[in-house]
Image (cartoon, helix red, strand yellow):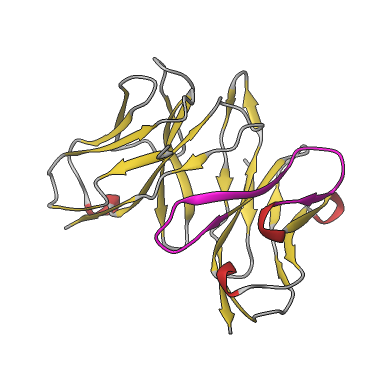
Amino acid sequence: NAGVTQTPKFQVLKTGQSMTLQCAQDMNHNSMYWYRQDPGMGLRLIYYSASEGTTDKGEVPNGYNVSRLNKREFSLRLESAAPSQTSVYFCASSPSHSYYNEQFFGPGTRLTVL
Amino acid sequence: AQSVTQPDIHITVSEGASLELRCNYSYGATPYLFWYVQSPGQGLQLLLKYFSGDTLVQGIKGFEAEFKRSQSSFNLRKPSVHWSDAAEYFCAVGPYSGAGSYQLTFGKGTKLSVIP
């Protein structure tokens, strides 16, 4: 039982390049989330998927797209990376989209955009 | 809109000493409140949560937190800190924003250093 896994762990991009961050969970959770963490800013929600087949914007969705590929996988895509997207990205999952359910976090992807 | 303030960016305590991390929130109704811990290089782990009822909440790893409505606070405490508690701690608030919808708002975090 690996929990929430994220790939890659580290990535360096040049401005304008695209990439996809992968996230998978093996806990049979319905809900999945993408956050970014910036120094002194805490975590901010980018997108979430309350259930398979649905996605919704969070606090900071601009410049990102997501795909809920199936119940296990939720990917985050940067179409044209910008230096402002340099951050640590965390994926999380939860049994359902509710306060009563804990969110389980992956180890993060550290992205640098030059 | 809801907000969370963690006034202390960095706290250093000696091993065995008591700990209190402060969290203040701004929200019109009774919020849902959480404390998460992030060890270096790791994702976040839930320590405890408050929804309603008893205002003193017990969590994992010997942590507890007290909800004080009059002070809009949800401070995290531990009576005796261990070196392994060195980490960053995040307070979060989560209001109900509509049918089937909610979002957690995180504070900026408090980094805890422990002196052996």
User: Which quarter of the figure has residue A2?
Assistant: top left
Q: What residue sits 62% from the left and 22% below the top?
A: B98
Look at the image and tell me in which quarter the N terminus of chain A lies: top left
For this rendering, which residue is in front, A88 or B2?
Answer: A88
Where does residue B60 sit, x and y in percent of width and height? Answer: 67, 53
Where does residue A62 sit, x and y in percent of width and height? Answer: 33, 37
- Give left or right: position of A38 versus B53: left
Establish if B13 lies above or below A34: below
Where does residue B67 sit, x and y in percent of width and height? Answer: 80, 51
Q: What residue sits 62% from the left and 40% below the top?
A: B1
Where does residue B46 sit, x and y in percent of width and height? Answer: 60, 48
For this rendering, which residue is in front, B6 or A12?
Answer: A12
Does the magenta run of residues contain B44?
A: yes
Does the magenta run of residues contain A47?
A: no
Q: What residue sits 39% from the left and 50% below the top?
A: A107
**Residue interval drawn in magenta:** B37-59
- Give left or right: position of B84 versus A34: right
